[in-house]
Amino acid sequence: KNEVEQSPQNLTAQEGEFITINCSYSVGISALHWLQQHPGGGIVSLFMLSSGKKKHGRLIATINIQEKHSSLHITASHPRDSAVYICAVAGNTGNQFYFGTGTSLTVIP
Amino acid sequence: DAGVTQSPTHLIKTRGQQVTLRCSPISGHKSVSWYQQVLGQGPQFIFQYYEKEERGRGNFPDRFSARQFPNYSSELNVNALLLGDSALYLCASSPWANQPQHFGDGTRLSIL
């Protein structure tokens, strides 16, 4: 069983749609990270959360510590948002990391 | 400012050989982490180093080792390479542990 589960695995959306990607985890964490990976491998850190909600442009990330669940929302999606989005958690000590398998998002013009 | 740089970008080895991958963190970052990403899967945590000491280790065999130098750059060594070691190896740095990480573009290792 994976410590971090993401859903959906694959997602296709029309440009402009509101998108939600979900992440559930089973371990105690000190922080949760949302990452974006484009074809070719480059990874960009989008958010690091330990509670509540963060917003950056069209991206919103929320976390519910009690339910061990986080969501990444993309408003007004655009084809350039097409990428793999990965949820990762840092364990309680902060020096163990667990990754989800990623959600592959394709936004169609 | 330069981002996290990794070298080489691509590498081809044969089974049984040894490989060394290198990572230079962002200037001022003291924490370096290594990850393995097999094609089609999410990354797997290998090591974290902070202030030249190992602070975390994932579930990888002893064939995998790493070190961090006084300038905070790091090397990942893999001995006795197996076909299953073929992957993208990612390095990430942060100012200190448990901070947002900045990733390099990775080293793609192919084992023949």
Image (tube, coloured by chain):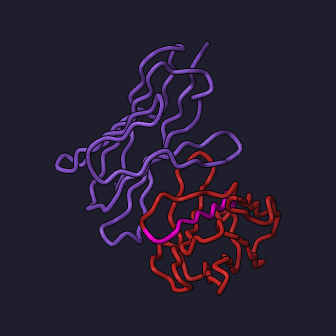
Residue name at image x 52 percent, y 49 percent: A45
Along the line of sight, the residue nearer the viewer: B80 or B24: B24
Count of number-bearing discs: 0
Whole-percent x and y of residue B85?
66, 65
Depth check: give the residue in front, A60 or B60: A60
Q: Colour of chain A?
A: purple
x then y, percent, for residue A11: 48, 26
Location of the N terminus of chain B by quadrant is bottom right
Name above or below for residue A78 compared with residue A52.
Answer: above
Q: Is residue A98 visible?
A: yes
Q: Quadrant of residue B66?
A: bottom right
Residue B61 sits above or below residue B105 on the image: below
Residue B94, given in percent of the width and then of the height, sits at 53, 65
Instruction: Provide the letter of the chain coloured red.
Output: B
Residue B89 forms part of the magenta stretch: yes
Q: Main secondary structure of the magenta part?
A: strand
A49 relative to A10, above or below: below
Q: Is residue B65 magenta?
A: no
Whether residue A7 appears in this view of the structure is no
Say which of B103 and B27 sits in front: B27
Tell me the residue at 22%/50% (across/down). A65
Q: Is residue B38 left or right of residue B5?
A: left
Q: Position of residue A42 (x, y in %)?
A: 66, 48
Q: Residue at x 30, y 54 (%)?
A: A50
Is the C terminus of chain B in the top left, top right, bottom left or bottom right quadrant?
A: bottom right
> Which residues fall within the magenta stretch?
B86-97
**Quarter of the image holding residue A22?**
top left
